[in-house]
Image (cartoon, helix red, strand yellow):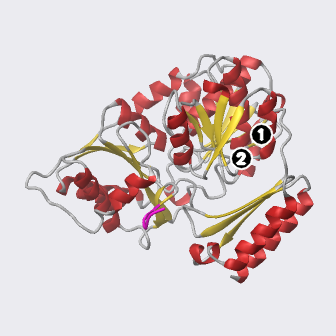
Amino acid sequence: MGNFFGTDGIRGIFGQTLTPKLAENVGNALCQVKAKPKILIGSDTRLSSDILKCSLAVGVMLGGGDVVDIGIVPTSCVSYLTETLCYDYGVMISASHNPPEYNGIKIFKSNGQKMNDDEESKLECYFSTSIETPFQGKYKQKNLSRIYMKFLSSCSDVSLENYKICLDCSNGSSYKIAPNVFKKLGAKVFVTCGKNKGELINEKCGSLHIEHLANFVKRKKADFGFAFDGDADRLIAVDSNGEIFDGDKILYILAKQMKKEGKLYASTIVGTSHTNSGIMNALNKYKINLIRTDIGDKYVIDAMEKMNLSLGGEQSGHIIMRDKIRTGDGILTAISLANVIAKEGKPMSELFDAHMLPQANIDCVVHDKMKVMNNEELRLLLSNISCSIAPAGRVLVRASGTENKIRIMVEHMSPTKAKKLAKEIKNLVVKI
């Protein structure tokens, strides 16, 4: 990761690590990489999104580029329209699943794919310089979301008219589009946290607070429910009983169906180092291979591109269906999962037959992520734990690419042992 970019764009608390001046520098830097670019900009509902969007647009226009502002849309909408409408870049102003005080900048290339690490590093080189051309660019506002909604509707090949579906829109980007699309597909839709309220985005709702949707589904007696995060690039699902289906489980269900329909290229999917080993073991029974990458959906899609694969994803709910779009799309994933349920005529619980290995996951807030990760005592402890639990278990400790946190995961056949070891690691992290 560079000085500004993390695992998913630039991320920080508005007014502190993420400022309007930085946004302006990003916009101007794009004009230094490519002369007179055409740039599409979208945002989520956060209160700081407008000023960051305008600041970035100023940087672009001073550099001679043109900006089209498409308003509040999911991240995947920016990706799709950037490629479909032949823009040079797409920019999404969003901090995804982070709390309201955060915001971020995600950049898509002309093919709808996020910049890789080398491209982000190159762009960062221009942040400290700026150019002003005598031919300033233009700024326009356009409502292009209908094009994206038409695309989403076309991705369903069955009617959902027999289903009652709950949607938790996290008071974010999906608040308009997701309910409209599912209604168009025939479903009876119940919506919670479906307002343009950036001050409440991700607050006790959405994919990171799935208990809210689980209770809502049971209260409405719905068939199943879908929860998105702030920019709708993630999906977590629940069935009628409130059972939670994270990205690993959704990836497994989709992989089996795509293999059955002959749509799973090379009978291989891409996961990450966090993907539950139980998923890998279960996929092997269906002769489906799992390839692991680093955490971050841009690494997943990069591996998919290199190996020409059609499906990949993360436990967090980023699912990439590369034949349709080149980034994680929570609404598309929800439609695809609903289609499997409708085609098979079975509830989600019956579509999932893998045995998951217990995982203990702990997030630890820190002041200096690199100080912790470079600590020799921590390295020694992780080495000892890895040796002691192999091959029955795994340990993964990493610095978050979006927040000041150390993320700890211990996977073991014994949930008690997994929790004990994870707590031991956390205690040392706190000490450091």
Furthest residue in direction bottom, as rendered: 431
Q: Amino acid at mark 2?
A: Thr
Q: Which residues are magenta?
A: 1-5
Q: Amino acid at mark 1?
A: Ile
Front-lying residue, 200 or 379:
379
Label 1 close to label 2 by CB (< 8 Å): yes
Q: Secondary structure at mark 2?
A: loop
Left or right: residue 298 versus residue 420 is: left
> What residue is at 63 percent from the left and 26 percent from the top?
266
Question: Does 336 sit above or below residue 408?
Answer: above
> Percent x, y for residue 391?
85, 53
> What residue is at 50 percent from the left and 45 percent from the top?
173
Furthest residue in direction left, as rendered: 134
Front-lying residue, 249 or 167:
249
Quadrant of the image occupied by residue 150: top left
Q: Secondary structure at mark 1?
A: helix
Front-lying residue, 107 or 118:
118
Left or right: residue 190 versus residue 4 is: right
Question: Does 144 sit above or below residue 398?
Answer: above
Quadrant of the image occupied by residue 110: top left
The residue that mark 1 highlights is: 279
As for residue 64 lying within the magenta part, the answer is no
Tell me how far mark 1 sits from mark 2, CA to CA: 7 Å
Front-lying residue, 76 or 111:
111
Label at residue 275: 2
How crowded pointer 2 is (Cα within 10 Å; few <14, some 14-19, many 20+) is rated as many
Let me know if residue 175 appears in the view.
no
